[in-house]
Amino acid sequence: MNMKYKVLLLSHLLIYSCATNVPKIDGLDYSGWVFDKYGCEGKRLELVSLIDLNKEKFLRFNQNQIIDILGRPENQTLFTRSQTIFYYYIQYNSSCKNQEVRQEDEQIKLEIRFDALNRSKSLYVHNYVNPLKK
């Protein structure tokens, strides 16, 4: 095999092996989630029920993979024992001009916790009752 083809094959292999496998969930518009910063446009509120129902599909990803999937979190906290928590706001944030604002502990937000090995270990939606759960 020609050296040129070997290099081309190797480069394709590296590119595709580094891509994050996004969880396949019917109806979940990842780009809509990413571009709805702080949930100001209401798109995250429409999508959070699907994420909550399929939370097990988001576990075991590292922080960079979660950022690839859901975008950069609006807030993050370093917790005890090298744990990190990502927060994605869904509704009632003060950054939104066209919706009601509530205190931090009353806002609807997605929390993803990472363990010391940088794996997502839990996913929780604060102040939200999922209408799809029965």
Image (cartoon, rainbow, N blue to C red):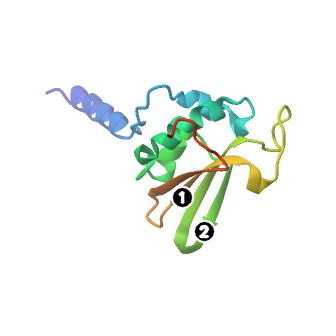
Which of the 4 image quarters holds residue 5? Answer: top left
Give the percent coordinates (x, y) of residue 29: 54, 27
- Which numbered marker is on residue 113? 1
Is residue 73 found left or right of 118 in the rendered image? right
- Vertical comparison of 66 with 43: above or below: below
Give the percent coordinates (x, y) of residue 48: 58, 38
- Vertical comparison of 80 with 62: above or below: below
- Evaluate if marks 1 and 2 touch, with contact meaning CB atoms under 8 Å apart: yes
Dot 2 falls on a residue whose secondary structure is: strand
- Vertical comparison of 36 with 129: above or below: above
Residue at left offset 49%, top offset 56% = 122
Give the percent coordinates (x, y) of residue 82: 54, 70
Give the percent coordinates (x, y) of residue 69: 50, 39
Is residue 68 in view from this perspective?
no
Which of the 4 image quarters holds residue 23? Answer: top left
Residue at left offset 58%, top offset 73% = 80
- Which numbered marker is on residue 130? none
Dot 1 falls on a residue whose secondary structure is: strand
The alpha-carbon separation of the residues under discs 1 and 2 comes to 9 Å
Q: Amino acid at mark 2?
A: Phe
Is residue 61 in view from this perspective?
yes
Q: Amino acid at mark 1?
A: Arg
Is residue 59 found left or right of 71 in the rendered image? left
Residue at left offset 84%, top offset 39% = 100
Q: Read off the residue under disc 2.
A: 79
Which of the 4 image quarters holds residue 35? Answer: top right
In the picture, the quarter occupied by the N terminus is top left
